[in-house]
Image (spheres, grey):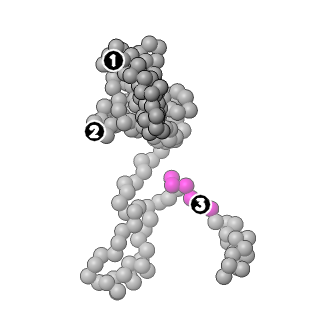
């Protein structure tokens, strides 16, 4: 059987095979042969469903670029923005600040501690994010999942300075790798908070 694998891989049938993109897939119909065999073998139990049976269909990609970007900012315990239509958002990705406009290419970005700017007309609302992910969809929807998010105007700069000093002291006196890692995270978050407040 293994001797025939190279022949199969080089055959014309294998060369014509193409992995479809998730956007190309239609809703998978139930395999009628499997369902019939299942019902003959176990007539009193419904056949199992595939994962695609539980998923809602993907929203269609618009043919024209919408004028607004729909933003969802979600925390584990709250939803700060829900289907808010804005002009642009700037997210603090690990690769740098990333501006997202309507019609942005679908992207997944890891977020670092930093400022999320939500632009709506001349108004700019800023949130400090500790970390998370941003999912930019082809239909001009941006889902931003953060561990913590706080409006920037609600942050006390004196507490940020105090926290930065405490975590810097912990980092200098840390003896184990775990203590160093925890202190470094605290320094990174408080440094980003300080930069957001002063910049």
Q: Name the magenta segment's main secondary structure.
A: loop
Q: Which residue is mark 3?
A: 19
Choose top left, top right, bottom left or bottom right for residue 57: bottom left
Foreground residue, 5 or 53? 5
Q: Which residue is mark 2?
A: 77
Choose top left, top right, bottom left or bottom right for residue 46: bottom left
Q: Which residue is mark 1?
A: 159
- Identify which residue is drawn at 33% across, 37% down: 75
Q: Is residue 36 visible?
A: yes
Which of labels 1 and 3 is toward the front?
A: 1
Which of labels 3 and 2 is toward the front?
A: 2
- Identify which residue is drawn at 45% across, 27% down: 173
Where is residue 91? Give x, y as percent: 47, 29
**Residue interval drawn in magenta:** 18-23
Choose top left, top right, bottom left or bottom right for residue 85: top left
Total labels: the figure holds 3
């Amino acid at each position: 059987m293994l001797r025939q694998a190279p022949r199969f891989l080089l055959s014309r049938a294998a060369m014509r095979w193409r992995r479809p993109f998730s956007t190309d897939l239609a809703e998978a119909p139930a395999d009628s042969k499997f369902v019939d065999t299942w019902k003959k073998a176990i007539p009193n139990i419904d056949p199992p469903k595939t994962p695609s049976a539980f998923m809602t269909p993907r929203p269609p990609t618009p043919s024209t670029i919408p004028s607004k970007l729909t933003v969802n900012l979600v925390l584990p315990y709250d939803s700060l923005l829900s289907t808010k239509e804005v002009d642009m958002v700037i997210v603090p990705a690990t690769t740098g600040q990333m501006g997202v406009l309507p019609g942005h290419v679908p992207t997944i970005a890891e977020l670092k501690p930093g400022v999320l700017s939500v632009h709506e007309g001349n108004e700019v609302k800023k949130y400090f994010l500790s970390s998370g992910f941003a999912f930019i969809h082809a239909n001009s929807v941006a889902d931003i999942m953060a561990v913590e998010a706080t409006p920037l105007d609600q942050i006390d700069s004196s507490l940020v300075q105090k926290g930065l000093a405490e975590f810097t002291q912990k980092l200098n006196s840390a003896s184990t790798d775990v203590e160093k890692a925890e202190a470094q995270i605290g320094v990174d978050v408080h440094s980003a908070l300080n930069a957001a407040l002063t910049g």
